[in-house]
Image (spheres, rainbow, N blue to C red):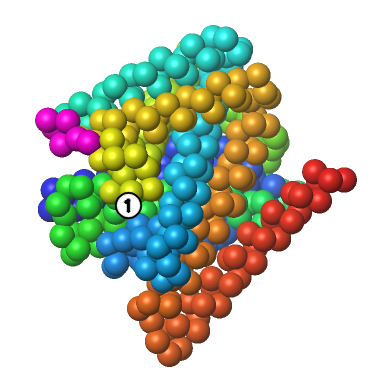
Amino acid sequence: MLKIIQVAVFIFSAQVGSGLFLLPSALCGIGYKALLLFFMVGLLCTLIIKIFAETGQNSHELIGEAFGVNTGKVFFFIYWFISWFSTVVLFKELVGYLGLRVFPGLAVEFSIWLFVTLFNMGHLKKMMLLESILTTLKVLPFFGLIICYFITPRATITPLSAVSFSLVLRCLWNFVGLETGNIIAKNLDISKREREIGTYLGMGVVIIFYVLSLFFCFSIGGTDLLWGNTAPYIDIFQKCLGAYIPAHHISYFIKLLVTVTLVGSINSWTISTGYVGYEGGELKVLPRCFTYKNKYQVPHISIFLSSLCVLFFIILCCNQNIYATTVKLIEISSCFFLFIYGMCIWAYSKIYLKGFRKVIYNLLAIIIIFCFISEIYKNILLILV
């Protein structure tokens, strides 16, 4: 039972983070249809994570088995590279929410990066303990929303725009890294049955958590408060609790909750990116040093070198508009992960399925890959024009 909970906790922690604070503003324009949209994206991602839970393989292993070892190696590098971007998003959103300028923001980012990296190079049990603590603290904003919901009159959500593929990518972002529980499970000696149960449990909790959070934010804030708001949680809590607590105290408290939540997600992605590098060493696409483990059986060199790549992109993006950078990184990351997952569905169908199920999975893979190509084509045209 403990191992099942470990997998579920890691899946929850890896997928509950920046989306919690970005989604309300991003999706309020389509009204309560956003709840259905997110739920449908969640179902698609559950179908995808089912593949990893059943096969016990990672994306590059599955693709390599179906389309050749060299193809698998190419997708390994794509996955590893994009995972750096996904981690940088969390750092940039944290700095944006705290309202820090370039150099103070960079100092905070470096301090968190150093702490998380060094901590995760230590004992595995301590690493998982920190992960569990940070995951537990992530639910505090949710309980705050529940309290606000019952003490605040309902606000109005007015649809202002139509559903777009960009909004689908924003929803997908919250499930990026859904296979990370499988990566950790392989290194914790967890059985297939335990991995599957933990995976489905974690995904179910994530979907319910996000849908209810969106519902509470929409009901409390409404379109007037949420539309275009880059820090909606601060305004939501000030609206509800401003008569009882000074506004600056609420602001400090929400910033603390945001910091804890995002540091928890940064911690999850640091672990995941490090273990992906370790598997790259085992595949012999990265130097052998990536496979070295310390006395606690943690791939410390892989974690450090992978984190070093993340630090490079943190510095590279330090002089740009925080909100615009965050949104663009989210779209890039989600788009490429969608491509990887589409290829995984195709590979799974090719290896394991027959008959009607094979046709359905192939059709789903074609649709996903087509959406990826269309999005890339659209962005190329925007650059050229």
Tell me residue 172's x, y (percent): 53, 52
Which segment is the magenta one?
292-297
Q: What amino acid is at disc 1?
A: Leu
Q: Relative to residue 252, is residue 369 drawn left or right? A: right
Q: Residue at x 56, y 78 (%)?
A: 363
Residue lying at the far bottom of the rendered structure: 355
Q: Secondary structure at mark 1?
A: loop
- Please state, as top left, top right, bottom left or bottom right, where the C terminus lies in the image: top right
The correct choice, above or below, for 60 with respect to 359 in the image is above
The correct choice, above or below, for 93 with respect to 65 in the image is above
Q: Residue at x 57, y 37 (%)?
A: 22
Q: Main secondary structure of the magenta part?
A: loop
Front residue of 241 and 12: 12
Tell me residue 9's x, y (percent): 27, 44
Q: Residue at x 47, y 48 (%)?
A: 77
Front residue of 315 and 126: 315
Front residue of 160 and 201: 201
Queried whether the magenta region covers residue 293, the answer comes back as yes
- The answer, for residue 92, to whether it is visible in the render is yes
Which picture quadrant has residue 274? Answer: top left
Q: Residue at x 29, y 54 (%)?
A: 182
The correct choice, above or below, for 2 with respect to 230 in the image is below
- The answer, for residue 147, to whether it is visible in the render is no
Q: Which residue is mark 1?
A: 283
Which picture quadrant has residue 287? Answer: top left
Which picture quadrant has residue 138? Answer: top left
Q: Relative to residue 382, is residue 142 drawn left or right? A: left
Tell me residue 210's x, y (percent): 46, 48
Q: Relative to residue 262, is residue 183 drawn left or right? A: left
Queried whether the magenta region covers residue 254, the answer comes back as no
